[in-house]
Image (cartoon, rainbow, N blue to C red):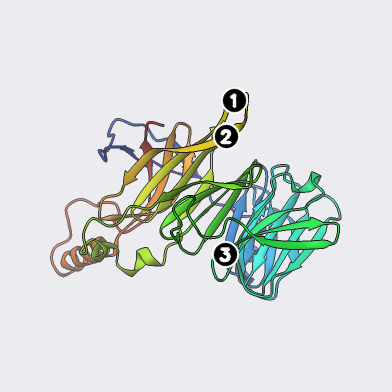
Amino acid sequence: MSSSSPTPVLADGNIDTNAEPQLKFEALHGDLDRILQDETISCLCLSDKILTLGTEEGRVHVLDYCGNQVRCFVLHKARVNELSIDVGEECVASCSDDGSVFVMGLCGDLSLKHEHGKPVKAIAIDPRFATRKTKEFVAVNEAGVVQLSTQGWLGRSDYALGGHMAPGVGTVVGKAQVVRWWKDLVAWASDSALVVYCMLQHRLICTIRRPKLASPQAPASGGAAQQGCKPSLLFGQNSHVYVSWPDCVKVVRVSTVMSAASTFTKAEQVCDLRLPDHLMAMGLSPFGRDLALLTIPSQGTQACVQDQQEQHSEGSSPQQETPDSSSPQLRIITHKG
């Protein structure tokens, strides 16, 4: 087992040098080693008990946390783009470039296949899928449209969910790239915005914009790498929505206001963090009351590191060995919200 100490960072960007190591990492082996010999992992999804892997070859592998394979589904004819597990860990949904969506039971004989006809890039299963007759899921097609698929008396039907328009404003928020479903809330993110939709009230709750770059020169540090990175999106405890783009992180709290006349759901932004130019965010997760943020150096920083390494190789070796500044880093971020 190898341990790693993530870099603790306060919300103002300062590094907390007094923090103790908080996370440990362990390499996963077992059947995973055999799978990696013949296949390439394209996506993964995990729950409290299982880890599911999608591959470029169209297979879905279900593993325990020791790396032992529990199930293997040969489903798709092309790469698996994303996976989703229901809250009861009874079903796993997968989508693929071949235009198909599968929902497979992990304990019983449940098997559902739905053809979209075009590549499906992202999927989120109804958290109560196993117990509901509607057997719903939301999927993002190649055009970036979020579609709800539901089972009715006359068969399965697909509906565009909320379109791509911000509520009350009528401005385009871009092509959806990732979608998540938690309780009665569905959220999706594009390159330019986060959208939260209430399935119970059948309406858009909010649209949170990604901040614009401060200056035209700002993209030089991230370059095309930022444009090719999908946003990271997930739900946390207490109806919090977490989203990160390469240059910023936002946390949104969704709450329900009840009155004698009606029930109203609202959302408010409780954290807005801009990353320094030399870093790009690649993913995030709640970590207690803090945030765990996976970062990599921007292209400009990587170039500087490479130049320094070349200078050291040409001249005398440095007196002290320093960590590889070009490697991914896990940072713990404290925020109020």
In the rendered structure, which disc, 1 or 3, sits on the residue that comes first in sequence? 3
Q: Is residue 283 left or right of residue 139?
A: left
Q: Is residue 146 left or right of residue 216?
A: right
Q: What separation in Å lies between label 2 and label 1 (alpha carbons)?
A: 8 Å
**Among all residues in the image, which is located at the extreme front?**
261
Q: What separation in Å lies between label 3 and label 2 (alpha carbons)?
A: 26 Å
Instruction: Give SS at disc 2.
Output: strand
* Residue 33 seen in the current view: no
**Location of mark 2 (residue):** 264
In the rendered structure, which disc, 3 or 2, sits on the residue that comes first in sequence? 3
Instruction: Give SS at disc 1.
Output: loop
Q: Are marks 2 and 1 in contact (CB under 8 Å)?
A: yes
**Location of mark 1 (residue):** 259
Q: Quadrant of the C terminus?
A: top left
Q: Are marks 1 and 3 in contact (CB under 8 Å)?
A: no
Residue 7: where, in percent of width, then height? 34, 42
Q: What separation in Å lies between label 1 and label 3 (alpha carbons)?
A: 34 Å
Q: Residues within 10 Å of mark 1 (few under 14, many from 20)?
A: few
Looking at the picture, which amino acid does disc 1 mark? Ser
Q: Judge by depth and name the residue closer to the eye, 321 or 232.
A: 232
**Location of mark 3 (residue):** 145
Residue 289: where, in percent of width, then height? 45, 31
Report the disc number at residue 274: none
Instruction: Give SS at disc 3.
Output: loop
Looking at the picture, which amino acid does disc 3 mark? Val
Q: Is residue 56 left or right of residue 274?
A: right
* Residue 275 seen in the current view: yes
Q: Residues within 10 Å of mark 3 (few under 14, many from 20)?
A: many
Marks 1, 3: nearer the viewer: 1
Looking at the picture, which amino acid does disc 2 mark? Phe
